[in-house]
Image (spheres, coloured by chain):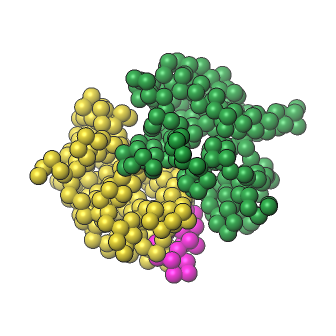
Chain colours: A green, B yellow
């Protein structure tokens, strides 16, 4: 029944959209990905602004409910569709106050520390060249340095046998890293950043091997391959 | 019993610290504010980094548990100490999936749309002059324009009798605005931004009149007055 399938508005290549798709895959929820033509500025048209008032992707629809902002959508998806079972709810909420707080802390670290650095590298090395701009290597170098310091702190956090940032299993705090990290590794010359620290390398290998992540990474790659063949 | 009082490490004048203090006040929880001497870079010393690995304030301690990142600490404080009762848990979690999602969405809007603009205005107009720097009016103008567009969207959201961003009552999505908005209104010439849109003006007046907010605003002002008298 089509009416029962949630809709994600956006393109899988967007790291923000990817976060939501990874959560839907982890939850085993059926979804439809509805394209938004960013090049044609469809995201500024009234029908998209009605779903996402700042014109961002992804937007999300579940029946009569519309949501925007990838981390907020992801929390909703995991709360509603994730079968907690033995593997946990991926938000820590079933594990008590401290487990939930650990997810909240490291999801904020992703948003406030990791993403600003990774996003600038991806923007300079991937997005700007794609739209005909020139990258500014000083900006790249600055954010590579910042990201390295963030990863140094992750390496310390992931020491002592801790396999994921916030819990014994993967949580939203880990999953939210997938989009930008996949673009960094697959589309820039800075993939080696993820290999400089042993615990970080093992964490990313573990994360990248999850079936949900493998599937969404393939969607991102397919979009990218289509774009390159269409513009060359 | 002193051991039962939670500790907040930082200065009340920090908008990030203010968010946590407002939540503690709303929850009626006893707390001790422990100064961190940012001017002396105490935040980069090992004892602070052990609590907050990126050297930020606030850090937070509740017994053996230490946390950092203001929004994560705030969620923990409201979950543990807020007596939900009739007035709600301020996270929407007691109200079901949609109520919780509304708080999550508008807390992300605060983090991704409001704060980046407000923080740049406060940095240029308040922080830089305080440490002997000169403000860049082009940066100020750019972010005043951006903040105005954010507030235009808030005005639409707050229409139709909606008194707070995410629910019938105040939630963390509103409270997280207090720190930067108070500095903007009290310490810059851009206070009028909060009066340009009727629904936004009413929302801020409503928020600023809450006893928890009044108390924390006074702590911020006292720090500021002390700093000015100490440096003049």
Residue A38 in the image: above or below residue A212: below
Taking the spot 45% from the left edge, 69% from the top edge, the residue there is: B194
- Quarter of the rendering occupied by the C terminus of chain A: top right
Bounds of the magenta span?
A: B149-165
Q: In this view, does B113 lie above or below A131?
A: below
Q: To which quarter of the image does residue B226 belong?
A: bottom left
Toward the viewer: B15 or B95? B95
Question: Picture coordinates of residue A11 (x, y %)?
Answer: 74, 47
B12 sits left or right of A106 in the view: left
Q: Does the magenta stretch include residue A140?
A: no
Frontmost residue, A155 versus B131: A155
Q: Is residue B40 above or below residue A67?
A: above
- Please state which of residues A154 and A202 is positioned toward the viewer in this rendering: A202
Q: Is residue B163 visible?
A: yes
x and y, in percent, of residue B97 in the image = 54, 63
Residue at image point 76% right, 53% down: A32
Q: Name the residue rendered at 67%, 38% in the picture.
A: A212
Q: Which residue lies furthest to the front in this view?
A: A86
- Residue A203, percent from left and from top: 53, 27
């Amino acid at each position: 029944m089509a009416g029962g399938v949630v809709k994600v508005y956006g393109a899988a290549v967007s790291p923000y959209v990817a976060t939501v798709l990874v959560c839907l895959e982890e939850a085993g929820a059926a979804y439809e990905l509805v394209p938004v033509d960013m090049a044609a500025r469809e995201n500024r048209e009234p029908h998209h602004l009605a779903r996402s008032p700042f014109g961002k992707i992804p937007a999300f629809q579940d029946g009569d409910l519309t949501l925007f902002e990838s981390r907020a959508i992801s929390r909703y998806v995991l709360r509603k569709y994730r079968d907690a079972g033995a593997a946990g709810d991926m938000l820590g909420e079933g594990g008590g106050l401290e487990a939930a707080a650990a997810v909240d802390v490291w999801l904020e670290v992703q948003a406030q520390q990791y993403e600003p650095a990774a996003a600038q590298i991806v923007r300079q090395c991937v997005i700007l060249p794609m739209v005909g701009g020139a990258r500014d290597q000083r900006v790249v170098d600055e954010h590579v340095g910042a990201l390295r310091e963030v990863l140094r702190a992750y390496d310390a956090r992931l020491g002592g046998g801790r396999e994921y940032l916030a819990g014994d299993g993967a949580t939203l705090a880990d999953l939210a890293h997938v989009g930008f990290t996949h673009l960094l590794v697959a589309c820039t010359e800075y993939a080696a950043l993820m290999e400089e620290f042993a615990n970080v390398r093992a964490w990313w290998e573990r994360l990248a091997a999850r079936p949900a992540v493998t599937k969404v990474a393939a969607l991102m790659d397919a979009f990218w391959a289509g774009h390159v063949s269409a513009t060359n």
